[in-house]
Amino acid sequence: MKKLFVFISFLLLFGKNISSQTLHFDSLVTTGIKQIYSINFSDAEVTFRKLMADYPGHPSGRFFLAMIDWWRILLDLDVETYDELFFQKIEDVIYNCEQILEKDPNNIDALFFKGGAIGFRGRLRAYRESWLKAADDGREALPIVEQASILDPENRDVQLGFGIYNYYADVIPDRYPLLKPLMIFFPDGNREKGIEQLTNTALRGKYAKYEARYFLMTLYYTYENNPYKAEEFANMLVSDFPNNPIFEKWQGRISAKRGDYFSGSKIFTSIMSKAKKNLPGYNTKKTKREASYYIGLQHRNTNQLDSARHFFEMCADISKEIDKKEESGFWVNAYLYLGKINDQLGNRDKAVEYYEKLLEMREYLNSRELAKKYLSEPFKN
């Protein structure tokens, strides 16, 4: 369901080619966008407030101020501190655009920013599992942005939104059959066309190229099972924004999926170091949980068992704090590895303790089967 509404979230972001605007306007927007992705939120706020002051009749300043809060939310989706403020700013964008459209119904900027604001509102509602409200936002936003695209058909950046829509509208119903009834409200998608549109924006877009790269990275990893293509876009993003924790985490997990645990461990060690320095977005429990897991995995692969045990214990301890509904795969696997490591180190009683705990946890892959096996006979290399 979340992916179903992702397409709307970015239909507008950076969508309007503003070459007709002044160089000053272009400079402010470009600078502010890069500040958001660099997680320099204070600087970005200064930039976009200046944009509002210099161009009070344009909706972009209000929209991008809301995007700062959007990225604050993305850094830790478990925290809802910024939700209400974000919704308030989104409503302000929508109201401002409607005021413009009352006087000029074909104002492309107002159409784009209204559609994009509604789309982002829908995306957050989907993250918060307010599915019906998210669906309503989707139905409301799509025709607004389609109208804008008709008025400006040559815009490469706008292909981002339609690429996301075409891809996910094709893929999601087959992946999640329960969502098929909702798709009757939307046009059919086209997976190949979606990838083509996203790639065009990623390579040739002016403002939306970073978002296109982000979505290509995630879809190649999650749906296309092509970590090599995913890595191409992850490397682009991390190269441009080395202190963006979301991009860096994706780069690390993609390396692990390719089987390159050495590179993955290096990336997650960098992430852990930035967490200790309290860089924005890095010092979250989920980030440190994931980093400790992959670092521990590389230590185990190189037979550094004491170090591996330390990081898997860290992973398990953090999981105890944050896994409220059910045990995560990180927690289950950490216990399985801790059982194996303790067996290898000759700590049979401790190993048995972990295997028995696994039998009380949810099944993850074949965790219980392996736990029963190693309770019968100790794990050996």
Image (spheres, rainbow, N blue to C red):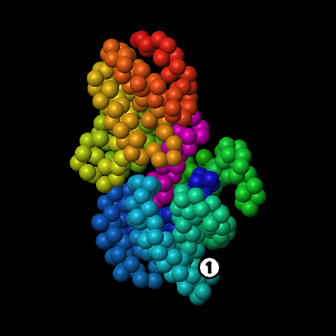
Toward which corner of the image does residue 38 lie, by quadrant?
A: bottom left
Of residue 39 and residue 34, the one placed in the foreground of this image is 39
Q: Position of residue 2 (x, y in %)?
A: 58, 54
Q: Position of residue 270 (x, y in %)?
A: 29, 39
Over which residues does the magenta segment extend? 205-225
| Label 1 packing within 10 angstroms: few (<14), some (14-19), many (20+) | some
Q: Main secondary structure of the magenta part?
A: helix
Q: Residue at x 42, y 29 (%)?
A: 335
The answer to whether residue 218 is magenta is: yes
Q: Position of residue 202 (x, y in %)?
A: 50, 50
Of residue 124 and residue 166, the one placed in the foreground of this image is 124
Q: Residue at x 36, y 26 (%)?
A: 298
Residue lying furthest bottom in this view?
103
The answer to whether residue 217 is magenta is: yes
Q: Is residue 113 left or right of residue 279?
A: right
Q: Is residue 204 left or right of residue 149?
A: left
Of residue 114 and residue 57, the one placed in the foreground of this image is 114
Q: Which residue is mark 1?
A: 106
Toward which corner of the image does residue 118 lie, by quadrant?
A: bottom right
- Above or below — where is 71 with respect to 114? above
Residue 117 shows in this picture: yes
Q: Residue at x 67, y 43 (%)?
A: 175
Q: Secondary structure at mark 1?
A: loop
